Image: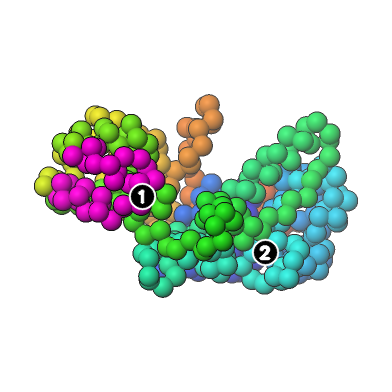
Amino acid sequence: MVKVEIPGRGDDGRHVGPPFKGSESAFFISVNRNKKSLTLNLKSDCGVEVLKRLASKADVLVENYRPGVAQRLGIDYERVKDVNPAIVYCSISGFGQTGPYRERAGYNFTVQALSGVMTVSGMPGTPPHPVGISLGDIPAGMFAAFAISTALLERMRTGHGQYIDIGMLDALVAMMEYPLARFGMTGVCPPAIGQYNPSITPFGVLETADRSIVLAAGNDKLWGLLCEVLERPDLLENPEYETNPLRTRNRASLYAELTKTLKTRPANEWLDALVEAGVPAACVSDVSDVFSDPQVRARGMVQRVVQPQAGEVAVAGCPVRIGESSDRAFRPAPQLGEHTQQVLRSWLDMTDSEIDGLRAGEVL
């Protein structure tokens, strides 16, 4: 993947911090490993021409300008399609290419706010609470990857490219399937969920003698197994807890009883017994726990790359396993313009003197 950046400054993500290690941003490293960096001044006619030449050889072009900017620069789908009719061209923006918000800037927090996510996160009765990851950004990228894969498959059949329009708000609204369905059925806005699922009980965070655990007894069989592990047949026999709707209706008293029992032993003792019985449960991990978790490590979900300015840095691995490609090595996030020479030589057969001429003209 070739990342096109502004000469001299690069992607804004390079400057997001702290934390920095050396001159490198943890944020930029986390989302740019395995990419190549090409600097190109797209405000110059020559820079636009170079991009079109690259696009003529590419399978996919992804841009994330505000709607209308790519057209003003002369690199919109219609003009790129002129040089490569088979191109799959994907535009990712805050709000998509249509609608009254189309020209607004879109960021993680703004789309979390507009999607309703902030009102169903956090504890009931507290101010709106954002989710602590870039939830406004990540689903848009995932839906874009899915759409691009679908378009490439269609191109194999037809030979024709596609234009794809992805909005960050659209993607996050799509992730709100359950709260939206609840409102659609009841006409009542769902409150913040807090520590417990509003429709399944027991299904949430509870306290043991030493730390928090999550229990997910999602059906009557699991409820029975949980009561066995806790040695609480009285709960299983209580008519107020006989079915999931009743357990949910009487959630407060049930959780008080469960917590009273769970606090008599440490989490690991409970976890061993619960897992052996087949009851879904887990300790609540902080990020340092994730780094050392044996399942996470066994799946290669913590990788280490060596950044030129920062040394060895841990990054998240790739969750996709596809045959032999699952074992590919991770490359560090690129230095600004690190691969400019390589890309222009290999893609466009440019000579060093031609590349030097572009640099002199402030195109690169």
Q: Which is more toward the observer, 112 or 20?
A: 112
Q: Nearer the viewer, mark 1 or mark 2?
A: 1
Q: Most extreme residue toward the top, as rendered?
A: 323
Residue drawn where x is 85% and y is 55% of the image: 78
Q: Which is more toward the observer, 195 or 94?
A: 195
Alpha-carbon span between mark 1 and mark 2: 37 Å
Q: Most extreme residue toward the left, as rendered?
A: 264
Q: Which residue is mark 1?
A: 248
Q: Which residues are magenta?
A: 234-263
Q: Main secondary structure of the magenta part?
A: helix
Q: Helix, strand or loop at disc 1?
A: helix
Q: Most extreme residue toward the right, as rendered?
A: 82
Q: Helix, strand or loop at disc 2?
A: loop
| Mark 2 neighbour density, 10 Å: few (under 14) some (14–19) many (20 or more) | many
Query: Which colour style is shown?
Result: rainbow
Q: Pick the quarter of the image with the C terminus.
A: bottom right
Residue drawn where x is 31% and y is 40% of the image: 242
Q: Is residue 75 magenta?
A: no
Q: Is residue 43 above or below residue 64?
A: below
Q: Which residue is mark 2?
A: 95
